[in-house]
Image (tube, helix red, strand yellow):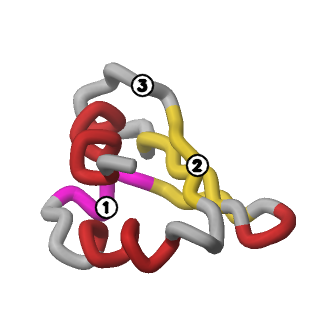
Amino acid sequence: MDFKALLADLHNGEIDSFQVTKDNYLDFYNIWRNYPYQNTVRGIADLDGVVTYVRELEN
């Protein structure tokens, strides 16, 4: 998965969400730790190690 592209698409409003599983979390984290817009994305934990990332709406 191209997490850099997914984060960019989420930030730009081109997608509403994407999911990261426990199997590919380390690949995601390597991109996430350098992502400059972390405060615009929220992760919602689900069962079995799945996290759904959504764009945080501004108030």
- Rounded to the nearest angstrom, the CA distance separating label 3 from label 2 is 12 Å
- Most common SS among magenta residues: helix
Assign a secondary structure to mark 2. Answer: strand
Which image quarter: residue 29? Answer: bottom left
What amino acid type is highlighted by mark number 2?
Gln
Residue 15, numbered label: 3
* 57, 30: nearer the viewer: 30
State which mark lies toward you, 1 or 2: 2
Residue 24 lies, with reference to residue 44, above or below; the image says below
Task: Name the residue tied to disc 2.
Answer: 19
Q: Which residue is mark 1?
A: 39
Identified by mark 3, the residue type is: Ile
The region drawn magenta spans 37-41
Earlier sequence position, callout 1 versus callout 2:
2
Q: Hey, which quadrant is residue 23 in on the image?
A: bottom right
* Pair 3/2: label in front: 2
Mark 2, other Cα within 10 Å: few <14 / some 14–19 / many ≥20: some
